[in-house]
Image (spheres, rainbow, N blue to C red):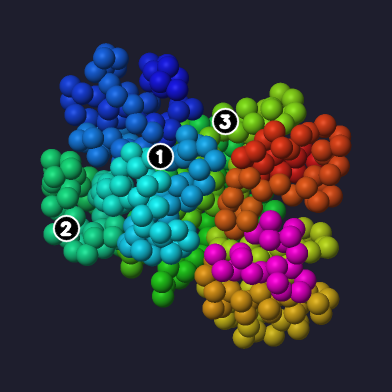
């Protein structure tokens, strides 16, 4: 691994952006492997899989290449899914306490600390503080949100806590780090970097075929969506820039505390962080030939587990066109122009107007009833108890609503045909079988 990092640094290999950072002993700075600054001598550098690890070792993020804005890959953790999930939850919801985190993971705080020390090399508390500071730096440099709003958004109880930690870690005050000065105070213009090999044409086409007209708009270079942010309804637009290999995200937001979860969801829905080169190797190991791998697909997600479940239920035993038509009808029955319906809105609307079997209507109503009072973890654990919802539906929700990377829809008719035609061995693709599923769909 060390030799791979060394070669990637020397060649500024874009495939490794977000997979590790380079810390320079002589400057006390850590950078992305693609940083355009003059390359330091090998004796003067150290490598860390996570920016938070470099910060804990006393290094500061480079103000030129901005490692806080890089893609984030946890592929180096392999099959250690508990640690991966913990890192993602801490990154996506910086305000949560560690007791809340362990409750969601179903483990004790002691076991969580043990896992972090073993796999990450620092405590969960240290990782959380460093992650909050990296997010704060990104928001300070790319938005005009007030320092008070940024502090709350990043999980600090007040601006003073952010200022103290920022000064200690970065040797700068938050004001000194600020670069955007000409945007409205509630405007968010953030650049979201993608990992190398991003396949926007596939993501665009996939989302466009399934777009719900009152909720989503897909153009040649952008994805726009109406979402709920707390009590507000927000329209966000992510515009793809092929030269920079990322999305320019634009939205107006009154409650900044909703921003971290929203940013994480945008990254997940657009699958910005997938390590394409590692996935390509797994697909080849499963038996796909180079001709079938000219472009490695991404997994276009769905905004929530509830929406994914509704899409899966309405899509049972009908064509994609018919499923999208039913989704549009459902949205219009509930409340158009306010995003995808909530479970409460689905329960309140007259779903008898939907032209589908009564059993499917009951399944939709029962699913909405479950989702109205359950967390996403509880929904996933119990949804198959609902009559009319089976393993395929749950797997689809895991694939697109949770963006789980190792979901294999072996009973899907298209997948069965493709496996037989191409001689694929899915077991050899783990833990990336979700990408094999999408790749086979795209080749059908």
Specify the label residue 119 is tagged with.
1
Q: Which residues are magenta?
A: 377-397
- In the image, is residue 294 above or below residue 266? above
- For mark 3, give the secondary structure: helix
Taking depth in this image into account, of 252 and 89 the one nearest to the observer is: 89
- Say which label, 3 or 2, has the lower sequence index: 2
Task: Name which residue lies at 56% across and 29% down.
Answer: 277
Q: Residue 259: say if magenta.
A: no
173 or 368, which lies in front?
Answer: 368
Q: CA distance from mark 3 to mark 2?
A: 39 Å
Mark 3 highlights which residue? 278
Please state, as top left, top right, bottom left or bottom right, where the C terminus lies in the image.
top right
Graded by Cα atoms within 10 Å as few (under 14), some (14 to 19) or many (20 or more), the crowding at tag 2 reads few
Q: Position of 137 compared to 175: left or right?
A: right
Q: Tell which of 395 and 295 is nearer to you.
A: 395
Which image quadrant is residue 303 in?
bottom right
Q: From the viewer's perspective, tell me whether residue 419 is left or right of residue 401.
A: right
Earlier sequence position, callout 1 versus callout 2: 1
Which residue is located at x 76 percent, y 34 percent? Answer: 425
Residue 395 within the magenta-colored segment of the rendering: yes
Q: Quadrant of residue 221?
A: top right
| Relative to 341, residue 114 above or below | above
């Amino acid at each position: 691994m060390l030799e791979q990092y060394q070669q990637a640094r020397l060649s500024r290999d874009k495939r490794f952006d977000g997979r590790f950072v380079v810390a320079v002993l002589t400057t006390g700075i850590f950078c992305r492997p693609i940083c355009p600054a003059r390359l330091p001598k090998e004796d003067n550098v150290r490598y860390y899989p996570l920016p938070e690890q470099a910060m804990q070792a006393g290094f500061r993020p480079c103000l030129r290449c901005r490692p806080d804005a890089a893609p984030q890959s946890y592929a180096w953790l392999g099959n250690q899914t508990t640690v991966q999930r913990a890192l993602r939850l801490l990154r996506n919801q910086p305000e949560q306490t560690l007791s809340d985190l362990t409750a969601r993971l179903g483990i004790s705080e002691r076991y969580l600390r043990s896992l972090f020390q073993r796999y990450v090399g620092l405590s969960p508390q240290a990782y959380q503080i460093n992650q909050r500071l990296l997010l704060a730096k990104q928001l300070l440099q790319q938005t005009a949100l007030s320092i008070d709003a940024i502090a709350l958004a990043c999980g600090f109880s007040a601006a003073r806590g952010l200022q103290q930690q920022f000064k200690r870690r970065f040797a700068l005050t938050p004001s000194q780090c600020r670069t955007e000065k000409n945007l409205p105070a509630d405007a968010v213009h953030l650049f979201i970097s993608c990992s190398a090999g991003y396949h926007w044409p596939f993501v665009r086409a996939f989302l466009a075929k399934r777009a719900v007209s009152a909720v989503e708009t897909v153009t040649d270079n952008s994805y726009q969506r109406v979402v709920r942010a707390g009590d507000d309804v927000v329209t966000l637009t992510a515009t793809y820039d092929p030269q920079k290999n990322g999305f320019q995200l634009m939205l107006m937001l009154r409650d900044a505390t909703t921003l971290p979860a929203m940013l994480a969801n945008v990254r997940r829905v657009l699958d910005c962080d997938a390590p394409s080169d590692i996935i390509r190797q797994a697909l080849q190991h499963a038996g796909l030939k180079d001709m079938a791998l000219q472009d490695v697909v991404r997994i276009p997600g769905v905004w929530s587990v509830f929406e994914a479940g509704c899409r899966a239920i309405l899509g049972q035993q009908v064509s994609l066109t018919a499923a999208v038509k039913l989704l549009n009808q459902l949205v219009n029955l509930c409340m158009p122009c306010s995003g995808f319906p909530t479970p409460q809105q689905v329960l309140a609307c007259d779903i008898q107007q939907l032209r589908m079997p009564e059993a499917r209507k009951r399944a939709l109503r029962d699913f909405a009833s479950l989702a109205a009072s359950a967390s996403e973890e509880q929904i996933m654990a119990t949804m198959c108890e609902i009559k009319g919802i089976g393993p395929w539906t749950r797997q689809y929700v895991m694939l697109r609503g949770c963006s789980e990377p190792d979901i294999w829809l072996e009973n899907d008719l298209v997948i069965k045909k493709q496996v037989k035609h191409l001689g694929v061995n899915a077991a050899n693709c783990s833990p990336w079988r979700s990408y094999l599923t999408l790749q086979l769909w795209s080749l059908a």
